[in-house]
Image (cartoon, rainbow, N blue to C red):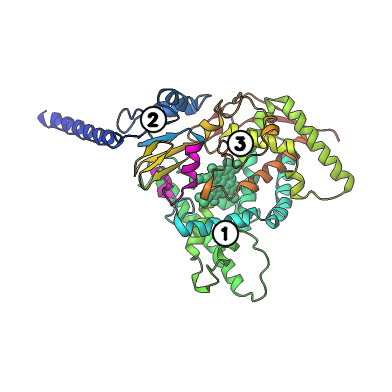
Amino acid sequence: MIWGLGCWVLVGFLIGSFWYKERKKTEKSGVPKGNSFWPLIGETLDFIACGYSSRPVGFMDKRKSLYGKVFKTHILGKPIIVSTDPDVNKVVLQNHGNTFIPSYPKSITDLLGKSSILQMNGSLHKRVHGLIGGFLKSPLLKARITRDIENSVKLSLASWKDMHPVYVQEETKKFTFEVLIRVLMSVGPGEDLDILKREFGEFIKGLICLPIKVPGTRLYKSLKAKDRLLRMVRRIVEERRMAMDGVTDEKGPAIDAVDVLLRDTNDSNETQRLPLDFISGNIIEMMIPGEDTVPMAMTLAVKFLSDCPVALNRLVEENLELKRTKTHSCDDYAWTDYMSLPFTQNVINETLRMANIINGVWRKALKDVEIKGYLIPQGWCVLASFTSVHMDEENYENPYQFNPWRWEKTGTVINSNSFTPFGGGQRMCPGLELSRLEISIFLHHLVTTYRWVAEKDDIINFPTVKMRKKLPITVTPIQP
Ligand code: HEM
């Protein structure tokens, strides 16, 4: 009895002192106002509940009205400063002087290798980001991959006419994975691709889970899947290195991300090659930001267009016009044809603004930083919320209305502080242009092949953006 009471007193004391320490940390002047609420749970339940509602920014909006655009809270086990201010977000993203480093929940850091591009910092990050970004943005890759994307999209769309209904979220995932793997390591359809798909699916399930690594837990199974993936990718990378070493001729342009990383020798010093394990790990980790984002953007474009027939009609008109021109001239489509359709690009901007597939980024301050009069103390995490900025009336008139025409006035301000679906600064998404190209090709072939009717479905925003019913639609081929 006495023991039981003693334990409760001890637990109470530990929680109380933890809470007191947390409060003390934030009592420095300039630290944003807010409510840390209960230790450990904090305001997590409200945060999750808003994620499941139709207004995920409800959590931010409520606190913004009480404490201002930058506030402190306690979510997902961490005290955190949330910024809904585009100027503050810009400074956090720019990261001058390496002040902010990525800070992910524990299950994610356990699954990512220490040398993952998503976690590395400083000069190594700059080097790898530069190599991958340079490759993914190159016109040569875009020209070549356009044919592959077209083939995958057309093959997939052809199968839709026999499906009743088509689950857009599932179907888009299939061909975008194929494209991603081709870009990263030139593996085409076949047994290897099927294994990669299966093991990656198992690996990714553990990204948001309890950080407990014992046999039987989700994290444990995901780590095992990662080991199997690593062995497989390592074999592919080794074979490629051997093939490369046997060739003495002048090298052509890099064919995929493996090639780019294998060729890099840091200032032409052959001994400074990136290690094979490092390359294999990074190839797997690059699948994470690329795998779910593009199909979700496509799915949400279909959802928003289904709910807005005027925008859909304008999109169909513009794309049919391009199709007529191409049929008439008998030319292949160039990647620039897809990217130069202004209304289609506006539809993509508007989809990315409203979809908020990456709702924000998490960083940790390495020292005290003052931005716009707010103090972010050393060691604190900051969530630079993109969703709040994208859905703020101060930045966008009628933010909940899908209105691609708004971009005609503002233009494609991809780097503006108020439009950051791909992040910004040193970690700005290197897959930005490839993603836009894939979505453009998909929309073109979808709207020039089919009409569709979508069943009612809702968007869920927690833990990641998804459609509750995977967006079922029924398609009817357009009569030629
Ligand atoms: C609509 C699609 C996409 C969206 C919305 C998106 C969004 C983002 C965002 C917001 C970041 C910044 C994360 C941060 O600052 O911590 C990021 C980083 C990254 N993305 Fe994407 N992404 C997309 C597609 C892709 C694709 C297709 C690839 C690969 C082919 C890719 C590869 C990466 C990589 C490697 C990083 C890490 C960059 C670094 O930390 O240096 N992304 N992405």
Give the residue type that dot 3 points to. Answer: Leu
Left or right side of 315 for 1: left
Which residue corresponds to mark 2?
A: 44
What is the distance, in whole Å, between disc 2 and disc 3 at their CAs? 26 Å
Q: Amino acid at mark 2?
A: Thr
Judged left or right of residue 364, residue 454 is right
Q: Is residue 432 above or below residue 409?
A: below
Residues at marks 1 and 2, CA–CA distance in whole angstroms = 38 Å
Q: Is residue 452 visible?
A: no
Q: Which residue is mark 1?
A: 131
Q: Is residue 4 magenta?
A: no
Question: Residue 312 location in percent, x, y?
Answer: 73, 29
Q: Residues within 10 Å of mark 3 (few under 14, many from 20)?
A: many
Report crowding for label 2: few under 14, some 14 to 19, many 20 or more residues within 10 A (C-alpha): some
- Frontmost residue, 159 versus 177: 177
| Label located before the other in sequence (1 or 2) | 2
Q: Which residue is mark 3?
A: 352
Front residue of 349 and 38: 349
Residue 362, given in percent of the width and then of the height, sits at 44, 41
User: What is the magenta range?
Assistant: 87-111
Q: Earlier in the sequence, mark 3 or mark 1?
A: 1
Question: Does the CB distance between marks 2 and 3 fall below 8 Å?
Answer: no
CA distance separating discs 3 and 1: 26 Å
Q: Look at the numbered disc 3 and give the secondary structure of its residue.
A: helix
Question: Is 239 left or right of 41, judged from the image as shown?
Answer: right
Which residue is found at the position 47% from the left and 52% from the top? 226
